[in-house]
Amino acid sequence: MKKIGIGICIGIMCFSSFFSYGNEQVLPHHHQIQKGSASYIETINQEKNRYVNYGDGYMIDYPSHMEVDTSLEAVRTLIKDQEREIEIYYDNFHNTPNSAPAYKNYSNAFIKNTKDHIKEYENTATINGMKVHLLKWSRKKLSKVSNDKNFYVSAEIVKNDKEVYTIFIKSSRQFYNFEDYMDVISSFKIIEKKGNPSINTKFKPVERKLNEETKEFYYKYFVNSDKLRWGIFEQSAPASFSYLKGIENRLDYEFKFLVRYQSLDVPMPLEELKNAYNNNRYVELTLQTMHMNEENESITYDILDGKYDDYFEEYAKKIKEFNHPILFRLNNEMNGDWCVYSSYYSSKDTNLYKEVWKYIYHVFEKNGVDNVLWVWNPHDLSFPNFKWNHYLTYYPGDEYVDIIGLTGYNTGNYYPGEIWRSFEEVYPHVYNEYMDIFEQPFMITEFGSNEIGGDKVKWIHEMFDYMYMHPFKNIKVAIWWNGIDWDPLRNPARIYRLDNREDVMDTFRQRLKDYK
């Protein structure tokens, strides 16, 4: 990840006021962190600096040798050195059903997994007049993580029932005493908010070594493409094309892109990819690092401790053997707690998700894989919708991502709390936000509309209308998810299929004519 303004003091700002710290008054020596940033650093003494964030309304002291990263200031501030990382978050739950107690309980639910987490301390304290929940825990060192920071402290600082600040400290060594982390936490103070925090970076594609066919594919369908192409998830394909070709004949449209999901229970589906290629199709190969019908709460730790080395080595060799272009989508929708590789299950530490990504990437690299385009794909809504679970905290870095995936569904209203969302309520906002942040090409990796809760045909027409009137020029591929989500009693809860109703099929057949 490119970091702008990390540990560099640019520009001197002069202020006439004094800041009070304890019994000491310090004439601020201000260092602006980032152009457009709502924060700055002031020097207190040789050992200590103060970070002041006007956008989120707080200030905190930290050892002066540490670097400050405000690249994701609207999400978090990161203060770090080689040994320790301090993440600071501000959550405002006004106009939402969330609350400070719910945030504290849900954020720390991972600690119930006593197999992988050792709770060392938990208590409630009062710091600078505010109620603070303190939790200290550890886990074992992971063999695949360099300089693994496996000792943790988090402090949820409650401003009121709807506003919470979180200080999350990770360390590669044990905390020797209470003051080892409380010096930073106890320095935290709330100040008046002025201005708005922002995202102060732009993520860009990095040229990678690809074989000629994959490079040609990437430029044809993504980099230089001015045409939207449609794909489909149909469960029987690419193992078999008999059913899919029946759909395509009825629609008079051939879907160039297919989706193949898999878990760790099966090897890389080499024969299915060959079948797709022989039928002139490309596959978005979606590997989700989990087991079906098994407990998976330890899976991130197990991968990073080397328990799946043989699996990934063999996986990489089969991808190399295939040697044709693959859209490799790893651990999609990671910001959703329905995914066992979400940090909700692993110490709320999004670094571990990124470590899994980089580990698998380097296994591929070691095996000479040069036919893979890496697709990084959050969900448009984060569950839980907490800042530490924000999708940007999962971004593994420019050198590891070729394509940005967008996923947002109209889930309908089968389940309590879900609402019918039009296409215009889902995609324009996500697209515009991503365009401000990412320079890689985009694809809608999977999406669809339920038919429970509204008019599905109308939804599809409005989708095509919007995409025609307001083309998303950076979205190169859109893949319809032709399936059903079932409730626990095996009743259809979200019916996304396009082939179960003639009126839906007629609509797609009519509107896909524009994309031939």
Image (cartoon, rainbow, N blue to C red):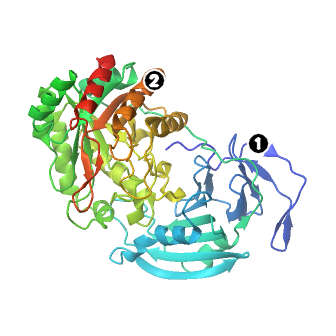
Q: Which residue lies under the disc numbered 2?
A: 471
Residue 72 position, x and y percent, is 58, 48
Residue 410 position, x and y percent, is 39, 43
Residue 469 horizontal side relative to residue 193, left or right: left
Q: Is residue 483 above or below residue 19?
A: above
Residue 190 horizontal side relative to residue 417, left or right: right
The answer to whether residue 187 of the structure is visible from this angle is yes
Q: Identify which residue is drawn at 11% across, 32% down.
A: 241
Q: Is residue 59 above or below residue 373?
A: below
Q: Secondary structure at mark 1?
A: loop
Q: Identify which residue is drawn at 16% across, 49% down.
A: 314
What's the amino acid at mark 1? Gly
Residue 320 horizontal side relative to residue 445, left or right: left
Residue 165 position, x and y percent, is 62, 64
**Residue 81 falls in image quadrant:** bottom right
Among numbered discs 1 and 2, the one appearing first in the sequence: 1
Q: Which mark, by number, is residue 11?
A: 1
Q: Quadrant of the C terminus?
A: top left
Q: Nearer the viewer, mark 1 or mark 2?
A: 2
Q: Is residue 115 above or below residue 328?
A: below
Q: Identify which residue is drawn at 70% across, 65% down.
A: 61
| Neighbourhood count class around disc 1 (C-alpha, 10 Å): few under 14, some 14–19, many 20 upward | few
**Residue 123 falls in image quadrant:** bottom right
Measure the alpha-carbon separation of dots 1 and 2. Answer: 41 Å
The answer to whether residue 218 of the structure is visible from this angle is no
What's the amino acid at mark 2? Pro
Q: Identify which residue is drawn at 25% across, 58% down.
A: 290
Q: Secondary structure at mark 2?
A: loop
| Neighbourhood count class around disc 2 (C-alpha, 10 Å): few under 14, some 14–19, many 20 upward | few
Between 490 and 180, which is closer to the camera in this rendering?
490
